[in-house]
Image (spheres, coloured by chain):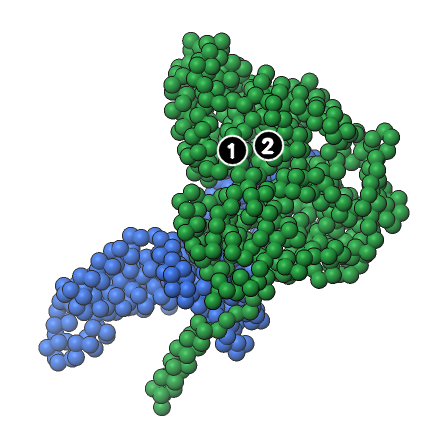
Amino acid sequence: MEIIKTIWKKTIYSLIVLIGLSIITFSMARLMPGNTIRMALGSRAPEWVVEKVMKENHLDESIYKQYYYWFKNILHGDLGSSWLTGRSVMEDIKKFFPATLEIAIYAIIFMGILGLLSGVIAGWFADSWIDNIIRVIAYMGSSVPSYIFAIFFMLIFSYKLQILPTIGRLSSGVIPPPAITHLITIDALLAGDFNAFFDALKHLILPATALGMQPGTSAGRLIRAGIVGNAGKDYIIAAKSYGIPDKLIMLKYVLKPSIIPAASIFALSSACIFVEAFIIEGMFNWPGFARYGMNALLSKDLNAISAVILIVGILYILANIIADLTVFWLDPRIGINIRSEG
Amino acid sequence: MKKKIKILLFICFITGIILSFLSVAGAADRPFRMCDGWPCYIDPSKGTDSASTESVLNLYDSLVLPDVKGIPQPLVAESWEISNDKKVWTFHLRTGIKFHDGTELTAEDVKFSMDRLTTIGEGFAYLFTKRVLSTEVVDNRTVAFHLNEPCGPFLSMLIRLYILNKDLVMKHIVKPGPYGDMGDYGKEWLNANDAGSGPYMLKEYLPQESVTMVVNPNYWKPLDPNVPDEFKIFNIKDEVTIKTMLANRELEVGYAALTREALEAMDKIKGIDITKFPANSMLYYMMHTKKPPTDDVHFRKALAWGLDYKTIIEEIKIGSTYAASPVPKICPGYDPTVLQYHQDLDKAREELKKSKYYNELDKYPVTIYWNANRAEQEKITLLFMSNMAELGVKIISVKTPWMKLEEDTASIERSPNVTTVEVAAEYAEAGAFLEAKYKSDSAKSWSQNEWLLDPELDASIDDAIGTIDQKERFAEYSKILHYITEDLCPTIFLCDNTMTIPYQSDYVDWPGGHGIGNAVAYYDYYGPNIRIDKEKMLDLLK
């Protein structure tokens, strides 16, 4: 119950952080160079049209009043209209967020598998040639940006070998399944459309793998370091002396404490994917949230910018909470410390 | 048992993956797929950018259609006449033109389209808002535009009036809206739907992703059987993606703004060629005529004589051609007798000596803005710095994001001495460039940084545009072009742009592939002018 109280406290603080974030984002978006309305309407639009649109959107009023109108609308669930798409920002988010969520889910799965496998194998064979190879790959992986991996994978699998599709969420001619979750793979499974499921999965392989490489290899390095550090501890030696098999010791006693440092990185990297994905989405013509946010920034689409940054803020807060919960589950001593502080 | 089920599921999963690699997705018979930027508005009253216009000109018809030279030819209008006072243009419409929903196009739709465009005021509206007083439906087949002043290139401007289905749009207006009784004028619905009569119909609009159009089987004009049956515009600008898609035959035409290295790599792919054709646009150095030291005409002429144009044409903007005068050579109204500046350092020094800043060059550096998104502009700026160093002129180079460039050029105080910008003409006449670049009412736009603010020049441009007879009008243009280039020299004309585009030369036949560029921007991608050889395409896919 102490952990629930802690999380509740964090949530309250997070709301304060979000309000602060909204003020900063709101102000900065308006301070950025460029006349928003001019950019939306075109440089040759008549002055009366520009003035009319500015008035309709309260852009002729003080920044405090503009924030007041914006905040009031947010409380009613109205994120305003996007001048770029001509639709409500809420509608845009509903359209584009699931696409990025889908990539993120598969990237996180890949990240987890890559991190765990590489970390465990490297730790198990510590200081051997296997460990050395994995560590070199891990250093390379964690220092190379995701878009470089994307270029590399695209050139190999789409260009040279032609076994994976280049762009989009589905091949042309494949009918999208009925939209329930708006995650095509899940919707396809729910509809029993395995053709669409596998086609969508094929389209996800390259972008998700490219996004998951860097955080996956970083997590792998941390896990390996944790395993090497924990493997020599007294309680492990004691367990070995009792005759407990090495495999069981590794998976049950060594691994759990070793992945604690990686868990925080893992959670924060998961949130980061939603932001970093914009280049990947551009390359793979993925109609995602990150690309939408980048386009909004480049066009100074004020309402879209504020909404995107708020959502990213919420994702980071959620990631922090999940990281805390995961760490607590992995190491219950943290719960005991909280009780004694309480 | 559980283990057996797990193994079975795993086998099914792997089989599914393998089968999905073997399956062939359905495709159009004769697709034409290209890529461009975003946003891509399919509402004719909205964007003027390339992707939007390329979509709209295929989905909608206008009264007239430009030929490759930009000369308007009858399309929806089969004939027209001008009143004696030159202020009323009356158009007689063809019969039997049907919108995509089967209803007939009438004069009422034309009036509605003009009223809608000028009321909303976005997109190409600026061509008409100050000129068209009213639109009159004379009868079902006749529509008249009443202008406030005579306008010689009005017919060329009407290329940009795309005709919407009034009844269909009115069914989808949302009230209340910013346009009174007209609500939102159908803007929300037209974001993702079409109300046109054009050679293509909207099949699918995926925001941020692509626009797909299919050929209109009931188009009123006979179409060649080999025109693309599907026309798709992808939102892709990444070079690796474009190269991969061209190699996999997933794209027929690449993007227009690729680097030299990318083009060379794509040229090596079997079946891909790089075509070059002139674009009705130019790259300019626009010089601020109200800010020292570029407020001195001799100083400006010194810069114009000092630049190494040859290196720009041959090494940096490869494929582009020498420019002379404010309009490209492809543009109707261009005058070849206008002075063409070239690098002549002696002349440059001579002009500099006449300048009032000659003895104080170190106190008056020249600030130049160039677009941060355009790598070639950086190279041109470095070349410019090196050339000017030989004259003793100091250049301060400022890499500028587009938003800042647009914002600063809207203010006479914040505008730099020189701004690097490409300007294209919305209609195919020299008047389009003169209005965009030198008239006072466009001084605050990014297409003009000269700040001439010259009422006499404004009046000359208005008089020229108001001349109905084309020969006389072009003669007026010529005088203005000479005056601007030779007397005022407010602009350095870096080059005439050329579109350099990779495409599938084995099976795509289009005017661009023959080096023919349309004088009206973006009409190079008019579907009925493109041919796809299906058999050759299938051969390449084997």
Locate residue A315: give its quadrant: bottom left
Q: Name the chain letter of the residue that bears numbered label 2.
A: B
The lab-note entry on whether marks 2 and 1 share a chain reads yes
Q: Would residue B415 be found to the left or right of residue B13 on screen?
A: right
Disc 1 marks which residue?
B321
- Give the distance between the C-alpha atoms of the residues marked 2 and 1, in whole angstroms: 9 Å
Report whether B34 appears left or right of A335.
Answer: right
At x 41%, y 64%, the residue is A162
Which amino acid does the dot numbered 1 rest on?
Thr
Identify which residue is drawn at 60% across, 37% down: B280
Quarter of the image for residue B337 reads: top right
- Which amino acid does the dot numbered 2 rest on? Lys
Answer with left or right where residue B265 lies relative to residue A129.
Answer: right
Q: How many circles with numbers are drawn on the protein?
A: 2
Mark number, residue B329: 2
Q: Secondary structure at mark 2?
A: loop
* Mark 2 surroundings within 10 Å by alpha-carbon count, few (fewer than 14), some (14 through 19), many (20 or more): many
Residue visible at 63% across and 45% down in the picture:
B523
Q: Position of residue B66 (x, y in %)?
A: 69, 43
**Labelled pair 2, 1 in contact (Cβ < 8 Å):** yes
Q: Nearer the viewer, residue A86 or B58?
A: B58
Work out whether residue B501 or residue B37 is closer to the camera in this orientation and state it: B501
Q: Is residue B133 above or below residue A326?
A: above
In the rendered picture, chain A carries what hue? blue
Of the 4 image quadrants, the one containing the N terminus of chain B is bottom left
Q: Which chain is green?
A: B
